[in-house]
Image (cartoon, rainbow, N blue to C red):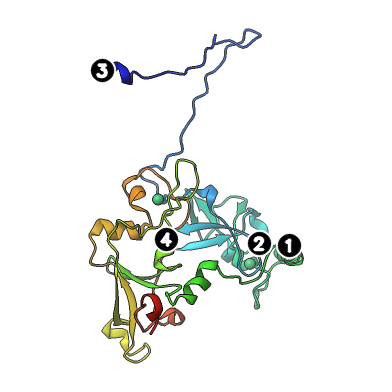
């Protein structure tokens, strides 16, 4: 096959370089969004919109400098009406628990959430804002657009099939509580269509982890935990470092190899604490088929 076969085809629109009235045109170049190499976060700010499970109001999710997710009220508020201890600001996609010296700041949704049973005492302007959020919740409830505390469908499906709905996973020498069953953990990367990658992290071609029963906590803490408890852990520690890193960054094999793709969601890992997360502890190995959970 000759090289001519692959001669590039150019579709540059014919242009005279002038508008109809003779003024010069300025060519517009499309700019692709890129993640800076020194960015502290790979998360695209624009996509992190969620809603509170308890009140249905909108939340903007950000990460803090220590990689913890924090839900902020979507609007900026005048700094004067927000107590100093409640102020947040966002810089380079990272949320910081303080004002930035400007006249505007952010506030956590948790501070304003009308569904909290023991709300903290708020200044009048913020109390008024919480009342408006409560009205919005009422409207959502009246129209059936929101059910408080509704769980994702995957959680109930997982429970029905005896898979741990929130498994404990061991990787990179740490234990994490996953947000979903292993098979449902989804890649967080953005595709070229600007949607979230639909592929799971556990793809058919990749090496799976192994369910094992291990002590709930290191020896020095064991006496503080439920007595001599062995828990089911999905162990990825035997995989290669790059594979464990792929799980930690929650990417499918394709996007693990594509370092330029930004993230459209936060990785769901939560550092596992046997005391804090005792309701998610499973003491039997998940089985297969009819023998699930026996
Ligand atoms: Zn809420
Ligand atoms: Zn992907």
Q: Earlier in the sequence, mark 1 or mark 2?
A: 2
Q: Which residue is mark 1?
A: 136
Secondary structure beneath label 4: loop
In this view of the protein, which residue sits in the foreground, 93 or 265?
265
Mark 3 sits on what residue? 2
Q: Is residue 203 left or right of residue 48?
A: left
Contact between labelled residues 2 and 1, with CB atoms less than 8 Å apart: yes
Helix, strand or loop status at disc 2: loop
**Is residue 259 shown above or below 210?**
above
Q: Are the residues at dot 2 and dot 4 in contact (C-beta closer than 8 Å)? A: no
Q: Which of the two marks, 1 or 4, is nearer to us in this view?
A: 1
**Residue beneath label 4, please?**
67
Front position among marks 1 and 3:
3
Question: Mark 3 or 4 closer to N-term?
Answer: 3
What's the distance in space between the residues labelled 3 and 4, CA to CA? Answer: 53 Å
Helix or strand or loop: what does disc 3 sit on?
A: loop
Q: Which is more foreground, mark 3 or mark 4?
A: 3
Which residue corresponds to mark 2? 57
Going from N to C along the chain, the mark reached first, 3 or 2, is 3
| CA separation in Å, label 2 and label 4 | 24 Å
Task: Answer with mark 1 or mark 4, whichever residue precedes in sequence.
Answer: 4
Quick one: label 2, few (<14), some, or many (20+) residues within 10 Å? many
């Amino acid at each position: 096959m000759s090289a001519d076969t692959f001669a590039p085809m150019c579709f540059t629109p014919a242009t005279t370089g002038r508008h109809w009235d003779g003024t010069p045109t300025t060519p517009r170049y499309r700019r692709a969004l890129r993640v800076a190499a020194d960015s502290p976060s790979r998360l695209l700010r624009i996509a992190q919109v969620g809603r509170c499970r308890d009140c249905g109001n909108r939340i903007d999710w950000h990460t803090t400098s220590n990689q913890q997710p924090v839900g902020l009220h979507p609007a900026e508020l005048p700094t004067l009406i927000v107590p100093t201890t409640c102020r947040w600001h966002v810089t380079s996609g990272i949320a910081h628990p303080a004002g930035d010296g400007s006249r505007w700041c952010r506030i956590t949704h948790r501070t304003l959430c009308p569904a909290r049973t023991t709300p903290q005492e708020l200044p009048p302007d913020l109390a008024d804002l919480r009342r408006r959020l409560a009205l919005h919740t009422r409207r959502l409830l009246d129209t059936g657009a929101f059910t408080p505390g509704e769980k994702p469908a995957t959680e109930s499906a997982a429970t029905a099939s005896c898979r741990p709905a929130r498994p404990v996973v061991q990787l990179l020498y740490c234990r994490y509580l996953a947000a979903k069953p292993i098979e449902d953990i989804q890649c967080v990367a953005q595709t070229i269509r600007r949607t979230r990658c639909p592929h799971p992290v556990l793809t058919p071609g990749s090496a799976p982890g192994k369910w094992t029963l291990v002590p709930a906590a290191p020896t020095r803490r064991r006496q503080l935990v439920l007595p001599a408890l062995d828990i089911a852990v999905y162990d990825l520690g035997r995989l290669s470092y790059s594979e464990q890193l792929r799980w930690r960054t929650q990417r499918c094999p394709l996007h693990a190899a594509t370092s330029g793709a930004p993230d459209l969601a936060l990785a769901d890992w939560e550092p596992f604490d046997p005391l804090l997360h005792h309701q998610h502890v499973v003491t039997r190995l998940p089985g297969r088929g009819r023998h699930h959970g026996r």
